[in-house]
Amino acid sequence: MSESTGQAVHLAALDTFPRLLMHHASVRPNRPAMREKEYGIWQTHSWAAVAQNVRAIACGLAELGFKRGDRLAIIGDNRPRLYWSVAACQCLGGIPVMLYQDAVAQEMIYVLQDAEIQFAVVEDQEQVDKMLEIQAEVPLLRHVIYDDPRGMRHYTQTLLMGLDALQEMGRIHDRNHPDFLDAEIDKGASDDISVMLYTSGTTGKPKGVCQTHGAFIAAATGGMEFDRLTDREDILSYLPMAWVGDHLFSFAQAMVAGFTINCPESGDTVMTDLREIGPTYYFAPPRVFENLLTQVMIRMEDAGAVKRKLFHHFMDVARRCGADILDGKPVPVADRVQYALGNFLVYGPLKNVLGMSRIRVAYTAGAAIGPDLFRFYRSIGVNLKQLYGQTETCAYVCLQPDGQIKLDSVGKPAPFVEVRLDDKGEILVKGPMLLKAYYKRPDATAESINAEGYFMTGDAGFFDEDGHLKIIDRAKDVGKLNDGSMFAPNYIENKLKFFPYVKEAVTFGNHRECVTAFINIDLEAVGNWAERKGMAYSGYTDLASQPAVYELIRDCIEKVNADLAADPKMSGSQIRRFLILHKELDADDGELTRTRKVRRNFIAERYGVLIEALFEGRKSQHIETLVKYEDGREGRISADLRIEETKTFAPHAATRAA
């Protein structure tokens, strides 16, 4: 057998995450697997050290009675020992179930009950308190193991145990039964469930998506080959562990490629930690890129006149030729010289401030990204690309190839993936990255996969002339106005959210005469705009009601209407009337999911009186809303909301002809 054939056979044998972990501990024992910033200092853990820690946690869990097939809840921020607990659970043939760490205790009950959780590993005192609060409602929960012991000294509940104590118990177990864990790892198979991730539950109860080792390894391998990732990459892991995107980028790909995961000190220090690490590979949803750019533009508006003029001059140069230079396309020599100077004076320092100096590949997904935002990052030399995927596909369906970047597409089908459209335009996908099943939901599993084995994504889209996929909206949300015009709410809302002043938007129009909209302003961006104009305001509700803010938002909406007028499919869906909500839409109030997706049915029910006011032509409407505060208290916010008209535009001639 040749050396290359032998290597291929060996790699094929690495078909579970525990086998991959032990492989890295063997071939690159001293390379950094994880770093964590603690007390201002970066602590580094080698692959060998990670394997030893995972072994101790796994054996400790086994000593507590954890068995093959059991589910382990994991709740907290991105911490090395929480990732190690995921791997430890997998070593024993268990199924890790990550929960959103910012969910309130009552929200966690459903998942803990549905997944029949007996064991939980949580980050700290805050998460322990949530478990104790709901203990009576999750009677199966027998063991809660906490990572951070701060504040836990006087907790005496018998179900609690520190992770340090669990690891010590595991080391004793490993010494007494040295062959136990290796035998458990050997029992694992590619088709075993490696993780259970819950859907966001925009229309009903979340579903547990069971994904296998083979599915996530296939998705990770395809992405690595596509972007030529190596074991020398650095990634900052700061997105929720319960989100499929983090599991693909921060766990699966790191386990397959052997690169380094870096965990920030806290959510508040992410930007500082990003600059210190300088990742080579970066992933963030559009709202993170939007927030970064908003902060940059706010700082530039406050800068001196010379610096502002320099910035705007070189940003014009970047818009003109930066993306073409990044893609290796021909650019006039004069522009190249100007761009090189701009790189020295503006783009380089800007990327350094953003922590993006070393990035080779950056991805965004989870929602549409505005073309101006996308163009900005690519123009300053950040290789930002879009991907498309879902929890049920390991966040892996389409990727954008280098040199073939389109602002309004999500790229081409990824390696190993087949994509087709049905007669109604719904996107269907097939490949090794598909879910094995929805947990305890054979009915939902059967409904999601058609007779030919394609997963029905529920998204509507189309392929352009170059084979790039463009997403329109959720298929079930696409409707029609009374005149027959297409109404795709998410498509319109994303165009609104491309403006920095608009944080959230919800549109209505299905089976109606026209389209109307709720708007949430972005308090930081609009607040900074108001301060520059010398406007006084006392908070969000006061700022949102100001006539000047209504004019600002009206201008954004009318620009979207002008854009829609040029779209043959959407010219009839221009927004006629709008209001600015008196409060921010909030996941704690049930209006958004934890991944910030709009829960349309809930909002339509809660704000029915506002929707009717929009369509009945009223000038204003009184509303009183119950809200939940971070400390658990409840209160009411009331306001008289203004309702404003907007200008619409005649469809373009080419649009009418189409």
Image: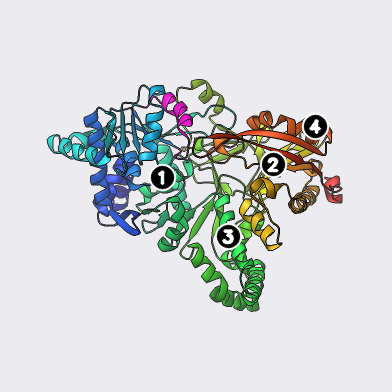
Q: What element carries label 2?
A: loop
Residues packed near mark 1 inside 10 Å, few (<14), some (14 to 19) or many (20 plus): many
Left or right position of 601 against 651: left
Residues packed near mark 4 inside 10 Å, few (<14), some (14 to 19) or many (20 plus): some
Spatial CA distance of label 2 from label 3 is 24 Å
Query: Residue flagged by tag 1: what amino acid is it?
Result: Asp
Residue identifier under label 3: 295
The answer to which of marks 2 and 1 sits earlier in the sequence is 1
The answer to which of marks 4 and 3 sits earlier in the sequence is 3
Q: Residue 77 carries which label?
A: 1
Spatial CA distance of label 4 from label 1 is 44 Å
The answer to which of marks 1 and 3 sits earlier in the sequence is 1
Residue 103 belongs to magenta span = yes
Q: Do the residues labelled 2 and 1 touch (CB within 8 Å)?
A: no
Residue identifier under label 4: 512
Query: Residue flagged by tag 4: what amino acid is it?
Result: Arg
Q: Is residue 496 visible?
A: no
State the extent of the magenta-drawn residues as a range.
Answer: 100-117
The answer to which of marks 4 and 2 sits earlier in the sequence is 4
Query: Residue flagged by tag 2: what amino acid is it?
Result: Leu
Q: Are marks 1 and 3 in contact (CB under 8 Å)?
A: no
Query: Residue flagged by tag 3: what amino acid is it?
Result: Gln
Nearest the viewer among 114 and 208 is 114
The answer to which of marks 2 and 3 sits earlier in the sequence is 3
